[in-house]
Image: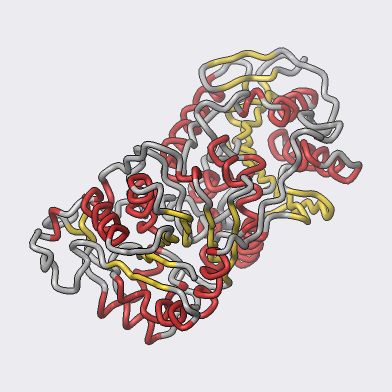
């Protein structure tokens, strides 16, 4: 039977695995729950002040556990932050690690600190080198508490300890790829993760995620929140046993060898227009002279800094820029630097600069501007919905994400259009794909409910058979009509 080494996330120790360990051992497996240095209930019992413990010490903790087990190959399980010391240990003992299980965890690479994926400001001002443990309702800031009973939450409050800040800020150091061995991802759907979300990330995200579609990578879903060892110990133990023998869903992503005939092209055949490049912004110019209203298109992400073509040179945004230029407007496309979940403030700054550049251009009527957001770029709409200047005549949203999923902890709370929408804001043109990713769709539903409560103006355009990114995926009369309808609605608002 399999041999498991279990490493928990922040503020917790080996105690959090108690029920899972019991079930694994009852099934005939060996299981070792690790309490990392400084994470004992009585801080400093390992002989080193907890505030001086760093990630390197936690990697060494896991290595010592591995070295003390007689079995040849082990399954290393890392939950949340725990994936950092697990990957560090697997890198040092590659011959002992038969599989790594990412349990509702991120995907860190060499040089990444855990703090990069943690809530905004969570490590700032840590007293005595320690991040205070959350309590009560503050656990939600660290992940969905769905499925936890009142007793579970009380247990977290009672047994949690402060997290040494250096374990979160010290970069992970790896000599190889975590995917040089079999890997399993266990996704907790109530925390915002799911196989469909990962498939979308692989199909349209940065190249680093292509490894998730590899033949030695499998996935499981658990219908619970971020602490399944407490909320669903039985299903979690079952999933770990299945992962150990190589089970799990392999991703189904489009076969790059046989792309559809329209791959890489915009769904409307729009003629080229004069295009001017100014820094991060391109202006697609109409034939009509004189200052014209403008539409600034805001792409989603995260994207890779090395991605080529960049979003503004992609078929989608070339197509949209030409489309509105053909309507007599200036189409502005932007490359903003949303290179990670913690980069939303930087991307928002890029957008603000782009708005000022566009408004100041003599070919643009700076008092008649629309902003059109796509995919996860929809989170950037929050600033403009909350405090709309008088020149912002419209906000358009296509296949948007309109609230951060629970596991996007690095996204600051301000980027939440569901909370920002209101009657005093600009009118919204919302295009909704019928085959949208469930996580995205849930945020769209929440946005519509909030808009209805506040009396905000929302023009809804439904595309029942369309998928996320339908501009290049689904070339149908329905999708073409939807894009034309959205463009006409935006034009009506900026010219009216």
Residue 108, x across and y down, in percent: 42, 45
Residue pictured at 63% horizontal, 26% vertical: 312
Residue pictured at 85% horizontal, 26% vertical: 269
User: Is 170 displayed left or right of 49 in the figure?
Assistant: right
Residue 245, x across and y down, in percent: 57, 64
Instruction: Work out whether residue 211 or residue 485 is closer to the camera in this orientation and state it.
Output: 211
Residue 251, x across and y down, in percent: 67, 51
Residue pictured at 20% horizontal, 57% vertical: 164
Instruction: Work out whether residue 189 or residue 243 is closer to the camera in this orientation and state it.
Output: 243
Instruction: Work out whether residue 4 or residue 125 is closer to the camera in this orientation and state it.
Output: 4
Please, is residue 407 above or below residue 2 in the view?
Answer: above
Tell me if I can see residue 357 in this picture.
Answer: yes
Instruction: Work out whether residue 362 or residue 43 is closer to the camera in this orientation and state it.
Output: 43
The residue positioned farthest toward the bottom in the image shown: 151
Tell me if I can see residue 427 in this picture.
Answer: no
Residue pictured at 82% horizontal, 44% vertical: 482
User: Is 208 displayed left or right of 204 in the figure?
Assistant: left
Q: How is the image coloured?
A: secondary structure
The residue positioned farthest toward the right in the image shown: 477
User: Is 173 displayed left or right of 341 in the figure?
Assistant: left
Which image quarter is the C terminus in?
Answer: top right
Residue 302, x across and y down, in percent: 53, 40
Question: Total marks drawn?
Answer: 0
């Amino acid at each position: 039977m399999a041999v498991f080494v279990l490493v928990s996330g922040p503020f917790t120790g080996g105690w959090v695995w108690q029920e899972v360990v019991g079930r694994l051992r009852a099934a005939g497996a060996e299981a070792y729950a690790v309490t990392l240095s400084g994470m004992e209930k009585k801080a400093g019992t390992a002989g080193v002040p907890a505030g001086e413990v760093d990630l390197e010490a936690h990697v060494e903790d896991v290595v010592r556990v591995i070295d003390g087990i007689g079995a040849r190959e082990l399954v290393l399980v890392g939950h949340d932050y725990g994936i950092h010391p697990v990957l560090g240990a697997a890198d040092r003992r590659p011959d002992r690690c038969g599989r790594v299980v990412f349990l509702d965890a991120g995907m860190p690479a060499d040089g990444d600190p855990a703090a990069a994926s943690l809530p905004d400001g969570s490590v700032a001002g840590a007293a005595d080198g320690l991040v205070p443990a959350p309590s009560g309702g503050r656990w939600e800031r660290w992940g969905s508490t769905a499925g936890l009973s009142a007793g579970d939450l009380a247990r977290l409050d009672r047994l949690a300890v402060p997290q040494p800040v250096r374990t979160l800020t010290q970069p992970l150091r790896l000599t190889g790829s975590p995917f040089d061995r079999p890997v399993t991802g266990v996704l907790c759907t109530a925390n915002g993760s799911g196989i469909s979300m990962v498939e979308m990330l692989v199909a349209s995200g940065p190249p680093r995620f292509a490894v998730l579609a590899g033949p030695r990578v499998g996935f499981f879903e658990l219908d619970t929140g971020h602490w399944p060892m407490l909320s669903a110990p039985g299903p979690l133990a079952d999933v770990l046993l299945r992962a150990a023998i190589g089970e799990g869903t392999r991703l189904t992503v489009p076969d790059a060898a046989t792309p559809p005939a329209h791959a890489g092209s915009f769904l409307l055949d729009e003629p080229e227009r004069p295009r001017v490049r100014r820094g991060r912004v391109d202006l697609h110019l109409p034939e009509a002279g004189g200052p014209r209203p403008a539409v600034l298109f805001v792409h989603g992400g995260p994207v890779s800094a090395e991605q080529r073509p960049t979003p503004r040179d992609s078929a989608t945004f070339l197509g949209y820029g030409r489309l509105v230029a053909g309507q007599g407007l200036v189409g502005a496309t932007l490359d903003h630097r949303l290179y990670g979940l913690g980069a939303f403030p930087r991307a928002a700054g890029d957008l603000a600069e782009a708005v000022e550049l566009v408004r100041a251009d003599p070919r643009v009527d700076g008092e008649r501007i629309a902003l059109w957001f796509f995919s996860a770029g929809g989170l950037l709409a929050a600033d403009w919905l909350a405090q709309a200047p008088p020149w912002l005549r419209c906000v358009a949203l296509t296949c948007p994400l309109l609230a951060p999923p629970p596991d996007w902890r690095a996204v600051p709370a301000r980027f939440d259009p569901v909370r920002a929408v209101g009657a005093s804001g600009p009118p919204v043109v919302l295009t909704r794909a019928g085959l949208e990713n469930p996580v995205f769709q849930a945020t769209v539903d929440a946005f519509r409910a909030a808009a209805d409560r506040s009396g905000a103006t929302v023009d809804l355009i439904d595309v029942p058979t369309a998928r996320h990114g339908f501009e290049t995926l689904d070339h149908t009369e329905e999708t073409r009509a939807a894009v034309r309808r959205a463009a006409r609605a935006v034009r009506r608002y900026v010219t009216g």
